[in-house]
């Protein structure tokens, strides 16, 4: 009896309890994540220091820091115009893809018709296939129509993957909205336009904003399609960086390319920060949960 009293009691583990000692696989995963961020930080810091450095060859840090590389890149490559073109292309592509993609996603989510699976497969192709596979024929069509090296061509080729991306993103989101809400509105006398704009649209705002952010980031960073049809006056920032790297057989100063890379990274970070002020991933999940409960 005394031995039983002295023996420590083992508490049964509850379903939510976690062991204090992590398993080897957990440590391996965390070590891989830490190594990834270390390498990523090293690359970013190296490019950032290089963009401000002068005479950086055999030392850990440059012998002198300067901002002249940014001024030279801004004036030599016309980055003011390049940045403006990038923002215009991104804004137009986002607006057009949402205006076209959301109604198309609604029809795919609410209607059943012969060949629906084939239509969905066709929308998947521009997203799943490498852009260069359909970019070359698409660029050939643009040049034959006289649109090569124009801003219009850049916008059109970026819409090819953007519109299907919005459709494929919004279709499952619309499917999770209870159709009884729309039926009740129609029984109350609301027309289809009023149902879509006043009832369905507010429920879809999180999904629309999320897809817009993804299209925006994708458009700013899309290189292949833009490069095939762009030219002077229609280059986006990512294409301008590539042209700077290959100009004069790669003879441009390395620091100029690094400064343009820093500007590109800052542009993407600013876009994401601004977008995340309007799009909260937790709100998107909560919205989907509410629609399921309804």
Image (cartoon, rainbow, N blue to C red):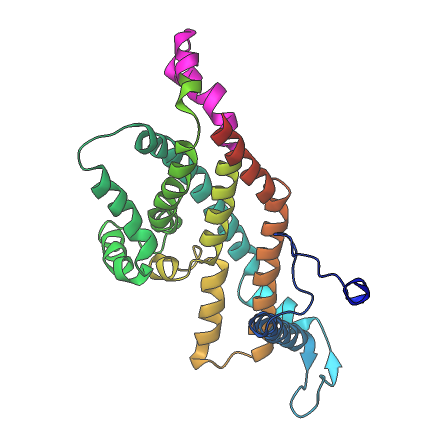
Name the residue nearer the viewer: 91 or 5.
Answer: 5
Q: Main secondary structure of the magenta part?
A: helix
Left or right, 83 with reference to 95? right
Vertical position of residue 58 compared to residue 62: above or below: below
Q: Position of residue 253 (x, y in %)?
A: 56, 79
Is 201 within the magenta? yes
Q: Position of residue 10 (x, y in %)?
A: 71, 61
Q: Position of residue 84 (x, y in %)?
A: 53, 51
Residue in the picture at 27% in, 42% down: 120
Q: Residue furthest top?
A: 189
Residue in the picture at 63% in, 50% down: 273
Q: Position of residue 109 (x, y in %)?
A: 34, 32
Left or right, 208 with reference to 43? left
Q: Residue furthest left?
A: 114
Left or right, 168 with reference to 251? left
Q: In the picture, residue 186 is in which quadrant?
A: top left
Residue 38 visible, this orientation = yes
Vertical position of residue 110 compared to residue 30: above or below: above
Q: Residue furthest bottom?
A: 58
Name the residue nearer the viewer: 233 or 121.
Answer: 121
Left or right, 260 with reference to 236? right
Residue 147 visible, this orientation = no
Q: Quadrant of the N terminus?
A: bottom right
Q: In the picture, residue 30 is in which quadrant?
A: bottom right
Is 104 within the magenta? no
Q: Please provide the residue range marked out in magenta.
A: 183-205
């Amino acid at each position: 009896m005394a031995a039983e009293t002295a023996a420590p009691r083992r508490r049964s583990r509850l379903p939510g309890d976690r062991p204090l000692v992590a398993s080897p696989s957990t440590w391996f995963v965390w070590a891989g994540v830490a190594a990834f961020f270390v390498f990523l930080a090293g690359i970013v810091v190296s490019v950032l220091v290089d963009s401000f450095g002068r005479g950086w060859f055999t030392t850990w840090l440059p012998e002198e820091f300067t901002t002249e590389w940014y001024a030279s890149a801004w004036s030599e490559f016309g980055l003011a115009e390049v940045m403006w073109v990038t923002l215009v292309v991104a804004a137009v592509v986002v607006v057009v893809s949402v205006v076209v993609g959301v109604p198309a996603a609604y029809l795919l989510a609410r209607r059943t018709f012969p060949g629906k699976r084939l239509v969905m497969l066709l929308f998947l192709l521009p997203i799943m296939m490498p852009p260069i596979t359909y970019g070359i024929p698409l660029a050939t069509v643009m040049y034959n129509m006289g649109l090569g090296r124009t801003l219009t061509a850049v916008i059109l080729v970026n819409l090819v993957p953007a519109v299907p991306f919005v459709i494929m993103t919004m279709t499952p989101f619309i499917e999770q909205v209870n159709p009884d809400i729309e039926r009740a509105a129609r029984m109350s006398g609301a027309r289809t336009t009023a149902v879509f704009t006043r009832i369905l649209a507010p429920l879809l705002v999180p999904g629309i904003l999320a897809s817009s952010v993804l299209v925006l980031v994708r458009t700013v960073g899309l290189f292949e399609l833009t490069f095939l049809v762009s030219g002077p006056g229609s280059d986006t920032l990512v294409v301008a960086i590539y042209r700077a790297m290959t100009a004069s057989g790669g003879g441009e100063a390395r620091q100029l390319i690094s400064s343009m890379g820093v500007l590109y990274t800052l542009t993407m970070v600013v876009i994401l920060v601004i977008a995340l002020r309007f799009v909260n991933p937790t709100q998107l999940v909560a919205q989907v949960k509410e629609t399921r409960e309804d």
